[in-house]
Image (spheres, coloured by chain):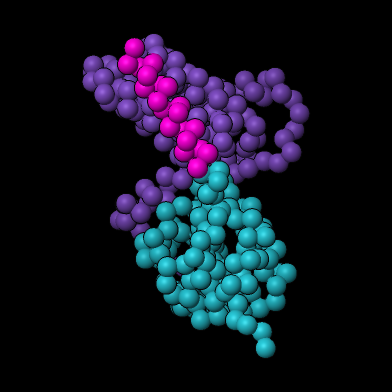
């Protein structure tokens, strides 16, 4: 009889986790004051902003995320797209507190992490986040 | 190697059913069957995928990388073996907890398309810094 209740509780817990994840996945949050240099990234920063994507081989939504970010960087001039293999850069993963892949960071021209999204972000959300990272045009 | 996502979801649904039935009945045989299915999934011979392919002939709209789900099958296998050990040794909390953990992941995959096993990969790598030599950049 215990097993029955364990099964029921597990399914209820899984449903709760699933619903929360559906709502939070890929949502863009504010960055927490970290800064990345060109040396950290192993590539130059974008002139106006940089989209940094952390990926692993064992990550299903990483490909779709790569497509979204490549689209955006092609659309908006001065925006660079850098993809980092999380496994080979565990130093950065620990420093930035990255728990999942894909994680997308939006950097301003100086490399400060302005926005952060865990999971696959929507294109519209990335564009809005970019606007926040880019310096005012004069 | 490419995978048909429909077959993976189908497999996750069958896995959920079997693991839930294991918990309800306490049957070691059901869990042993699922452990074998996980092991076959790791070597890309999942019986559930084969069953799906036997009935559904149409080609998938898109395919996905087969490595993440294979890794997740390996994670499932670890929990199934732990659960088996629990049932066989009479350690009920271990049996229930391990089987429930596998059910949680399988159900999340079947119902929501989230691959919990895949996502543990980075966490495991974070915890095991010296497991492999790293090549920077």
- A58 w.r.t. A86: above or below: above
* Chain purple in the figure, letter: B
Q: Where residue A108 appears, x then y in whole percent?
A: 54, 76
The residue shown at (52%, 66%) is A115
Most extreme residue toward the right is B58
> Camera-side residue: A11 or A109?
A11
Asked whether, in this view, residue B6 is left or right of residue B70, the answer is right
Residue range corresponding to the magenta coloring: A1-20
- Magenta stretch contains residue B4: no
Look at the image and give the colour of chain A.
cyan
Asked whether, in this view, residue B13 is left or right of residue A73, the answer is left
- Magenta stretch contains residue A5: yes
Name the image quarter holding the C terminus of chain A.
bottom right
> Camera-side residue: A56 or B113?
B113
Name the image quarter holding the N terminus of chain A.
top left
Most extreme residue toward the bottom is A138
Q: Where residue A134 appears, x then y in whole percent?
A: 60, 77
The residue shown at (60%, 26%) is B10
Q: Where residue B101 appears, x then y in whole percent?
A: 38, 31
Asked whether, in this view, residue A131 is left or right of residue B135, the answer is right
- A98 w.r.t. B119: above or below: below
């Amino acid at each position: 009889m215990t097993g029955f209740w364990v099964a029921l509780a597990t399914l209820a817990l899984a449903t709760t986790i699933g619903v929360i994840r559906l709502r939070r996945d890929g949502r863009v949050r504010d960055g927490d004051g970290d800064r990345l240099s060109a040396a950290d990234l192993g590539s130059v920063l974008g002139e106006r902003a940089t989209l940094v994507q952390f990926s692993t081989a064992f990550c299903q939504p990483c490909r779709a995320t790569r497509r979204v970010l490549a689209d955006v960087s092609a659309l908006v001039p001065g925006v660079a797209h850098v993809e980092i293999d999380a496994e080979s850069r565990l130093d950065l993963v620990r420093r930035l507190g990255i728990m999942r892949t894909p994680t997308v960071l939006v950097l301003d021209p100086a490399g400060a992490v302005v926005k952060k999204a865990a999971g696959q972000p929507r294109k519209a959300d990335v564009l809005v986040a970019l606007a926040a990272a880019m310096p005012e045009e004069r | 190697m490419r995978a048909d996502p429909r077959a993976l979801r189908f497999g996750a649904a069958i896995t959920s059913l079997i693991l839930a039935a294991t918990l309800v009945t306490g049957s070691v045989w059901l869990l042993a069957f699922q452990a074998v299915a996980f092991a076959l999934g790791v070597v890309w011979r999942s019986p559930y995928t084969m069953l799906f392919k036997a009935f559904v002939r149409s080609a998938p709209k898109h395919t996905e990388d087969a490595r993440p789900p294979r890794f997740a099958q390996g994670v499932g296998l670890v929990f199934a073996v732990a659960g088996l050990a629990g049932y066989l040794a009479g350690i009920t909390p271990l049996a229930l907890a391990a089987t429930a953990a596998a059910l949680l992941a399988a159900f999340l995959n079947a119902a929501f398309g989230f691959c919990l096993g895949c996502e543990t990969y980075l966490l495991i790598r974070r915890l095991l810094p010296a497991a492999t030599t790293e090549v920077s950049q």
